[in-house]
Amino acid sequence: MLVKIGIYMILKSFFMKDKNNHLGVIRLTFGILGSLALAYLLIMYIAKFLQFSIFENIVIAIILLPLFWSLFGLWIIMSKTKFNSVLKTLIPFSILYILVFGVQ
């Protein structure tokens, strides 16, 4: 009985809408680290198609990385639930990872 109530509370807190007065550890973790990983993968994907030298690609990455990182971070942190923030990190990460490295 207690295990059933505990599982219900965990699932309820994970899938239900959070209060907006506190962000929570999951959304902040995925917002910071997940958006950094997404930004790096997007920079790698963009650099893959540019026909510039390595130094020009580095300059473009230095300019665009903070922009992408902050945009992805805001997009993830502003999720309504913890589950949405996890999905907003994992789905684009898997798509960009496949696009950059391919399926082998």
Image: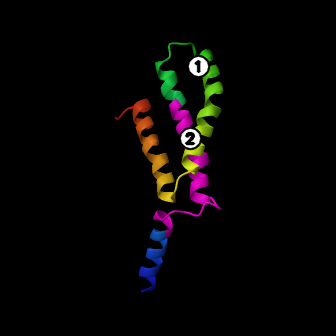
The residue beneath circle 1 is 57
**Which amino acid does the dot numbered 2 rest on?**
Phe
The N terminus sits in image quarter: bottom left
Measuring from the top left, give residue 47's x and y in whole percent: 52, 22
Q: Nearer the viewer, mark 1 or mark 2?
A: 2
Q: Nearer the viewer, residue 22 or 28?
A: 22
Depicted 97 relative to depicted 20: above or below: above
The residue beneath circle 2 is 72
Q: Magenta segment: does it hold 14? A: yes
Q: Identify the main secondary structure in magenta.
A: helix
Q: Looking at the rendering, which quadrant does residue 39 occupy?
A: top right
Which structural element holds mark 2?
A: helix
> Spatial distance from mark 1 to mark 2, Cα to Cα?
21 Å
Q: Looking at the rendering, which quadrant does residue 69 occupy?
A: top right
Q: Which residues are magenta?
A: 13-42
User: Callout 1 environment at 10 Å: few (<14), some (14 to 19), or many (20+)?
Assistant: some
Q: Nearer the viewer, residue 70 or 98?
A: 70
**Which amino acid does the dot numbered 1 rest on?**
Asn
Measuring from the top left, give residue 50's x and y in whole percent: 50, 17
Depicted 67 relative to depicted 90: above or below: above
